Image (tube, grey):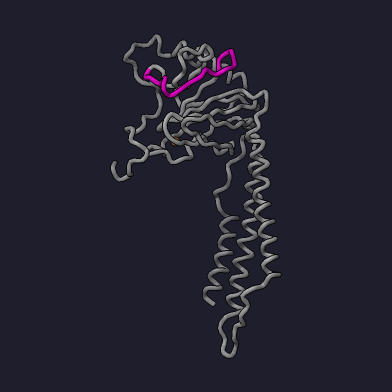
Amino acid sequence: MAVAIAIALLVLGSIAFHVLSPWWRTPLASNWGSIDSALTITLWICAVAFVALNLFLAYALYRYRHREGHRAHYEPENTRLEKRLTFWTAIGIAGMLAPGLLAWNRFVTVPKDAAIVEATGQQWQWSFRFPGADGVLGTSDVRHITPDNPFGLNPQDPYGRDDKLIEGSELHLPLNKPVKMLLRSKDVLHDFYVPEFRARMDLVPGIITYFWLTPTRPGTYEVLCAELCGVGHYMMRGTVIVEPEPAFRAWLAKQPTYAQPATASAPASSEPAPVQTPPKPIAANQPRGER
Ligand SMILES: [Cu+2]
């Protein structure tokens, strides 16, 4: 009886926590309302299953408790019950998968007029690149990375000459304009995640992954790395500022290009770019206790 009451209280407590919890989704700042819908549908299906199954469990514990003179009867198979359980489980799982598949299909189908931005991850900071006037990003490869060429742009590729390079981890995006995010990693797996955009994607060394979004709310949002990528993972953060297009254009015009780096006129021993100082590079697979 105590267990049945505990299970019932667990259900009531979970519902109360859901209603009273301050931990809600941040206000949506992109076009990905369909991802919110998929999350909400999944939550409701799981909630109905959780409440119904646990209350049934509590009821069965009480109803079929041990009593003198009562004897359980043996029923190892019940085809009708199994068919009904299989049917409703299939409906529930299909209901959770279908909205996600629809949202995913749109997520990777980039509109033709989308602008291009590249985000590069490394232990443990973000950098960004925009194509220049030609609208094409130059090719890049980790083999080209040197202290003078941290983005690893191909020096022979004319398309890369006018690329805008943003080494600090502050990205600006124009409001209400679709943008295709290309994602590249220099070292290990990272994950580009802006909670307000709902959108996220892994950065995988050796390939370029992508998704697209349209920012719909001006503001300043945090870029997080959502993939455990080593001891400095927690501080691999950036900022994305969504602003009207004229302000964005003005900001972009001030950014250095590959052919004309910002530090070209500064003394050679100038301070490094004002990015967060990461802890000493330590291999991602090094045990945590070693530090
Ligand atoms: Cu990371």
Instruction: Name the foreground residue: 17 vs 100.
Output: 100
Q: Residue at x 68, y 47 (%)?
A: 98
Residue 212's place in the image compared with 63, above or below, is above
Q: Quadrant of the C terminus?
A: top left
Left or right, residue 206 beside residue 177:
left
Q: Residue at x 45, y 36 (%)?
A: 189
Task: Please check the rendered image and state whether residue 139 is part of the magenta-colored stretch, yes or no.
Answer: yes
Left or right, residue 89 beside residue 164:
right
Q: Quadrant of the N terminus?
A: bottom right
Q: Residue 53's x, y, as percent? A: 62, 65
- For the magenta stretch, what is the residue range? 131-147
- Toward the left, the furthest residue is 290
Instruction: Name the foreground residue: 119 vs 250.
Output: 119
Quadrant for ligand 1 reads top left
Q: Residue at x 40, y 10 (%)?
A: 264
Q: Residue at x 56, y 60 (%)?
A: 14
Residue 274's place in the image compared with 91, above or below, is above
Q: Residue 32's x, y, as percent? A: 64, 37
Instruction: Name the foreground residue: 2 vs 128.
Output: 128
Residue 232's place in the image compared with 147, above or below, is below
Left or right, residue 32 beside residue 290:
right
